[in-house]
Image (cartoon, rainbow, N blue to C red):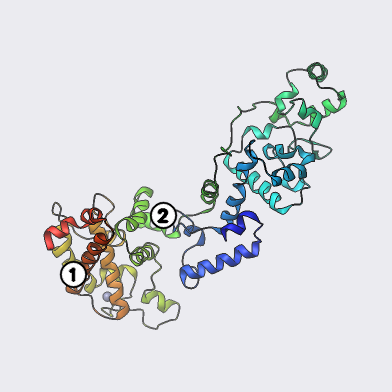
Amino acid sequence: MIYPSSVICTPYEVIKEFNSLIFRFLWNGNDKVIRLSTYAPYDQGGLKMLDYDNMVKALRLSWLKRIADPDYVGFWKCYLDHLLVNEGGLFLFQCNYDINRLTISAIFYRELLDWWSKLREVKDPDNIYKYILWNNKEIKIDGKSVFYKHFFDNNIIYTTHLLYEMTNIESFNAVRDAGLKKSNFLVWTGLRQSVPLKLRVHVPNFEHILDLEKFKCRDYYQLLIKQKYERPNKWAKLREEFNLEDKQLSEAFVMPLRVANEPYLRSFQYKVLNSILYTNELLCKIGYISDPNCSFCHQTTETISHIFFDCSFSSSFWNETCEKILNKLNSCVCLSLEYRDIILGFLTGEMDLLNYIIILGKTYLWTCRCKETKPSFNHFERILLNKYQTEKYISFKSNSINLFKEKWRIFEDLFI
Ligand SMILES: [Zn+2]
């Protein structure tokens, strides 16, 4: 998809179709969190999903590198320069143009011009390009922006070049003396009058909006996606529920990726944080089952907090896990596992192995629920031991025994 999209136009229908395929694959059905949040980076609660729409734009914008590079020569570049001959050629890219007023009909370049002007507007709305006289949508003569080649060739480019500190006559004489031939006073005065007052003063220093010659597709994509993504809906709710700072929430979303190598554990924790697990309460609400009660105790409504914490089966599971494993691993403090610790993990200190075991424990509880069996600590202990041995084996095979030791050292000392 990337290659064709970098050299030819990608119709909107293709982008739409691509999105619906890829999101159907991700969720195995309908979306379960707002789509904009999946584009976010991990520390903002997202999945770093690829936004094809912005990828197409970034691929196109990366052509600017070769347009801006004076040493780059190519047929397409000459052709583009020719297409824009009435606007001063490639110089147009520097101007504050209105895409709807341009006559260029090649859609590939038209989209590039359109996306470039929009990106620039967001990135740096008060840049010097707004003060370029030519093709400027705010400087119009007879309702149209203009490009006077003979002025341009005489280095009259910015609004300051119209010498507003002088009168019309003085300034006209001054530019004529400086070499501007083939012009008349009326054209000069008309141009001076058409510049809005705010553009005659406070001209900013010249500064590049972006380093076009260095900017690559990836850089454009980062800029664009930053403007688009949102945090998941659950972000604000978690912050309120557990009285957290944004920084702590970032850690809560990133931590599973650090402590667990298994994709199924990572994605399970993502579902916990986003509250998208189908508990009996939820299944009953959508009419899938008739009994909303807990799969373990059958006495109380099965919510996320009940199945992972409040239920007597879960709390005795955690008590035993805490007493026989977690407290031993964390010899300095005696932990009392609270609901917050179960859902988010410990967000302070070096607790990676403990956090791993808590995620594994939650996944175990959920598996028991789905298999309609009761959780048992002994069974979980065997699962944990199995994880230890599997990771050890993998680390031998992949020559990463140090990473393994770092994670499991205390566990090894105590239990093996
Ligand atoms: Zn229960």
Tell me where residue 156 appears, x and y as whole percent.
74, 26
Residue 379 seen in the figure: yes
The amino acid on which the numbered mark 2 sits, given as a three-letter code, is Tyr
What crowding class fits label 1: few (fewer than 14 Cα within 10 Å), some (14-19), or many (20 or more)? some
Of the image marks 2 and 1, the number of the one nearer the N terminus? 2
Give the CA separation, mark 2 to mark 1: 30 Å
- Compared across the picture, whether 158 is left or right of 339 comes to right
Q: Position of residue 250 (x, y in %)?
A: 37, 51
Asked if disc 2 is less than 8 Å from ligand 1, the answer is no
**Quarter of the rendering occupied by the N terminus:** bottom right
The residue most toward the bottom is 290
Give coordinates of residue 169: x percent, y percent.
Answer: 83, 18
Q: Disc number at residue 42? A: 2
Figure quadrant of residue 139: top right
- Label 1 sits on what residue type? Glu
Q: Residue at x 12, y 58 (%)?
A: 413
- Horizontally, is 249 left or right of 158 in the view? left
Residue 362 appears left or right of 28: left
Q: Secondary structure at mark 2?
A: helix
Residue found 36% across the figure and 53% down from its top? 249
Above or below: residue 57 compared with residue 183: below
Q: Is residue 137 visible?
A: no
**Ligand 1 location (quadrant):** bottom left
* The C terminus sits in image quarter: bottom left
In the drawing, does residue 271 fall left or right of residue 94?
Answer: left
Q: Tell me residue 339's x, y (percent).
A: 27, 62
> Residue 381's mark?
1
Q: Residue at x 22, y 74 (%)?
A: 313
- Say what secondary structure mark 1 lies in: helix
Quarter of image, res 144: top right
